[in-house]
Image (cartoon, rainbow, N blue to C red):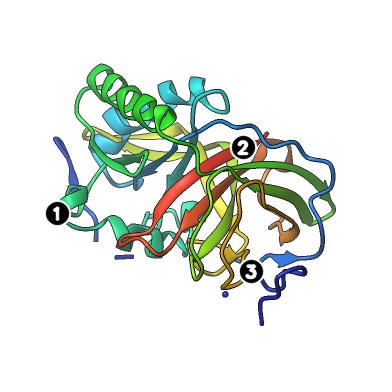
Amino acid sequence: MKKLLAFVAIVAISFMGCKKDDDNSGTPTGGGGTLTVEKKNRPLLIDFSEDWCGPCGSNGGPAFDSLLSYEGSMLTAIKVYSGSNNAALNWSTGNGLWTIYNNATYGGNGIPKFIIGNKYQGVGSVNSTVSSSLTKANTFIADSIVAGIALNKSIEGDSMKVNTKIQFFKSQLANTDIRVALYVVEELVIANQLVGSTNVATYEHRNIVRTSNSSTYSGLQINSTAAIAVDQVFDNSFSMYLKPGWDKSKLKVVAVIWKMNSNPAVVLNSNVAK
């Protein structure tokens, strides 16, 4: 399938399935301002999909769209295409994200595939997939809160600026690798999709990843090698290029805190700016 850090200033910082065979680097430019971090867990839902995958259109898409009704309040969500026939849907960095989940623990290489709260969720019937996904989301929400993230966004011309603030509620050992990834997603894109065995030209593709703040799925490291104390805060701002073809009125940002010392890496928390 198709990170010199300083302590004060942070610098360049399937049940049913098919076989799954431009991105810019964001630039951190300063502090996150007066954002307030909620002490609340929100799991990240990842939908791995492609436009040539029939079950992705018939089961994965509708289940994902249903779960979007919980976006922000209960979870965040991104849909990842990296090998679709319509190249305009693809996110090149999605290959790296796929790599950590393309194994037996996470359901092998079949799609559609959901990952929610760091756990694999097979995609069968729409109702059962939604129900099981919400159960996994609630498990993540009920877990102890390691860190939270707040963010806001603004768009000017072909650039999106995102301010972030991460606050830790549990201490972390020295040499813990913490990164923030910002995924710019387009809320709605109308394009072809195989639904079962039928091509649907007006299919609604939701929350597809357009770009991110790094050339790697995990974003940019925010901390030094020093231990992280309880209530320690990391503020930053990032600027990302937006391509002309994207509908800026439909762009939002999903922010994810990744802990890379785990194998595989795990999502500590997430949030969204609409």
Q: The C terminus appears in which quarter of the rendering?
A: top right
Mark 1, residue position: 104
Q: Residue at x 21, y 22 (%)?
A: 125
Q: Residue at x 76, y 50 (%)?
A: 163
Residue 232 visible at all: yes
Mark 2, residue position: 272
Mark nearer the N terminus (2 vs 3): 3
Instruction: Identify the amino acid type marked 3.
Output: Ser
Rendered image quadrant of residue 63: top left
Picture coordinates of residue 169 (x, y %)? 57, 42
CB under 8 Å between discs 2 and 1: no
Mark 2 → mark 1, Cα distance in angstroms: 30 Å
Mark 1 → mark 3, Cα distance in angstroms: 31 Å
Picture coordinates of residue 226 (x, y %)? 59, 70
Disc 1 is placed on an element classified as: helix
Q: Residue at x 64, y 69 (%)?
A: 25
Instruction: Identify the amino acid type marked 1.
Output: Ala
Disc assigned to residue 25: 3
Picture coordinates of residue 198 (x, y %)? 27, 33
Q: Is residue 124 left or right of residue 31?
A: left
Q: How many marks?
A: 3
Disc assigned to residue 57: none
Q: Residue at x 43, y 63 (%)?
A: 260
Instruction: Identify the amino acid type marked 2.
Output: Val
Vertical placement of residue 120 versus 61, above or below: below
Disc 2 is placed on an element classified as: strand
Mark 2 → mark 3, Cα distance in angstroms: 19 Å
Q: Callout 3: 10 Å neighbours few (<14), some, many (20+)?
A: some
Disc 3 is placed on an element classified as: loop
Residue 22 visible at all: no
